[in-house]
């Protein structure tokens, strides 16, 4: 249950840092007031009541003129970031532990005024800048609740730190608890909804709503309306306080505009310039290195036939220009079996990393703007682990009115 101070803070719309500056106390003191660990002084409570009753909402003091500030956790190659920059956000902190993903991230966001932080578990929440929005495509891990039953038996209180310690969600939770940004977006594989018979998601939702005070909406979104790939991911969007948000208004592209693989494949007819690493010659033909060897192609066919006899659906996926692909996974570098491109009269081929960039929406059809500075193996892992960028754009646009509402109101009141 929200404390009186937490409710007043939500009504003002201020960040943790802005509230601390307004009251002349430290962010940790504000955090204790919000949790109810310490009672605010009467004059501080009165000041918050007066501010909450005002007809305008103050803008948190920041050095940026952007509409809102956000942090990018478990950032990968920046798939979540793109959509929120496009609606006026400024990234003020990035965390990604994989050195190869860091390399791709830096190549595509070279103007950041902050370094990429490494392992989030080793970063103190106090060292993360104040922000309005938290983005996190955190990995799904088993949640160990060992010790919780014992604490219940001993009638000892426990919170998310006990229930989620040792999982990467704990790091998201502790940062939310300290900074209490106005909103967050969490993204994960769709199986998060059913993991451990639903207990994992229930624990996450309990932590975000009951313990951290957010109103949370969830939705499993398939990227297929935006890119030619069946790719389902779960999104959790939370806003502090009583601000209303719903996925009901999510805008999908019209059915007549649904893309097929033709929009991402190299045309190989000279209509695009050759990219030496992936294509060659005047017609920009795909390099022969992406065509499967006879040995690998025979192995995949035999493997599929063996499982068909057993009644299983395992096997490779063949696509042509008019098809929609299966989900691109991080294991694509091994044999490319989930998405193989038909080649008349010869063995099928893998997608090139450039085609993967288009399939994930980092590049528009026919474009080659996203920088791929790493090996093909690392590129396949990175795109397979990422989120479909056009889906994030749609979610960002749906959230935009809520994210910039405070700034717009303040601007009107000069």
Image: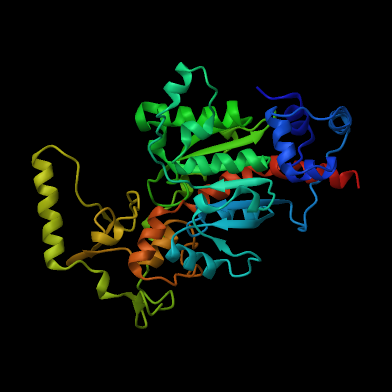
Question: Which quarter of the picture shows residue 331?
Answer: bottom left
The residue nearer to you, when weighing 139 against 194, is 139
The residue nearer to you, when weighing 195 against 16, is 16
Residue at the (37%, 83%) spot, across then down:
282
Q: Position of residue 409 (x, y in %)?
A: 83, 42
Query: Is 78 left or right of 33, judged from the image as shown?
Result: left
Find the residue positioned furthest to the front: 154
Q: Position of residue 77 (x, y in %)?
A: 49, 60
Q: Position of residue 294 (x, y in %)?
A: 12, 67
Find the residue positioned furthest to the bottom: 282
> How many circles with numbers are drawn on the protein?
0
Residue at the (42%, 27%) spot, across then down:
147
Residue at the (45%, 16%) spot, across then down:
153
Q: Measured along the vertical axis of the image, is residue 379 above or below residue 22?
A: below
Query: Is 109 left or right of 137, judged from the image as shown?
Result: right
What colour scheme governs how the chains and residues are painted in the rendered image of this protein? Answer: rainbow
Quadrant of image for the N terminus = top right
Residue at the (71%, 31%) spot, across then down:
34
Q: Measured along the vertical axis of the image, is residue 112 above or below residue 275?
A: above
Q: Position of residue 326 (x, y in %)?
A: 32, 49
Question: Which quarter of the picture shows residue 142?
Answer: top left
Query: Is 355 left or right of 135, judged from the image as shown?
Result: left
> Can the viewer see residue 58?
no
> Can the viewer see residue 253?
yes
């Amino acid at each position: 249950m929200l404390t009186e101070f937490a409710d007043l803070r939500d009504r003002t719309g201020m960040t943790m840092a802005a509230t601390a500056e307004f009251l002349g106390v430290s962010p940790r003191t504000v955090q204790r007031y919000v949790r109810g660990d310490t009672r605010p002084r009467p004059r501080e409570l009165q000041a918050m009541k007066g501010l909450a009753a005002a007809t305008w909402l103050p803008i948190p003091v920041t050095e940026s003129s952007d509409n809102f500030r956000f942090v990018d956790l478990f950032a990968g190659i920046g798939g979540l970031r793109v959509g929120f920059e496009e609606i006026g956000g400024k990234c003020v902190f990035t965390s990604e532990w994989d050195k190869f993903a860091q390399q791709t991230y830096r190549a595509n966001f070279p103007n950041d005024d902050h370094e990429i932080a490494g392992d989030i578990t080793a970063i103190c929440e106090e060292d993360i800048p104040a922000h309005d929005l938290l983005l996190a495509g955190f990995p799904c891990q088993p949640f160990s609740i060992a010790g919780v039953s014992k604490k219940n038996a001993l009638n000892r209180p426990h919170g998310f730190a006990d229930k989620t310690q040792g999982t990467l969600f704990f790091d998201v939770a502790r940062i939310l608890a300290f900074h209490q940004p106005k909103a967050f977006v969490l993204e994960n594989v769709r199986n998060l909804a059913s993991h451990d018979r639903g207990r994992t998601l229930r624990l996450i939702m309990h932590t975000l709503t009951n313990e951290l005070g957010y109103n949370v909406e969830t939705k499993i979104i398939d990227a297929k309306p935006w890119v030619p790939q069946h790719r389902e991911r779960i999104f959790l969007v939370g806003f502090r306080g009583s601000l209303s948000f719903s996925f009901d208004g999510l805008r999908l592209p019209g059915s007549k505009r649904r893309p097929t693989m033709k929009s991402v494949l190299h045309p190989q007819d000279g209509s695009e310039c050759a990219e030496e690493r992936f294509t060659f010659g005047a017609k920009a033909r795909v390099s022969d290195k992406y065509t499967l060897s006879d040995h690998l192609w025979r192995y995949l066919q035999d493997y599929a036939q063996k499982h068909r006899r057993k009644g299983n659906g395992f096997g490779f996926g063949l696509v042509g220009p008019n098809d929609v692909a299966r989900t691109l996974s991080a294991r694509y570098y091994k044999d490319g079996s989930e998405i193989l491109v038909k080649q008349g009269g010869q063995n099928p081929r893998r997608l090139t990393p450039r085609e993967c960039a288009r399939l994930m929406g980092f590049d528009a059809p026919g474009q080659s703007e996203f920088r791929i500075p790493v090996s093909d193996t690392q590129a396949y892992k990175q795109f397979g682990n990422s989120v479909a960028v056009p889906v994030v754009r749609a979610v960002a646009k749906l959230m935009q009115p809520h994210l910039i509402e405070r700034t717009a109101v303040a601007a009107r009141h000069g």
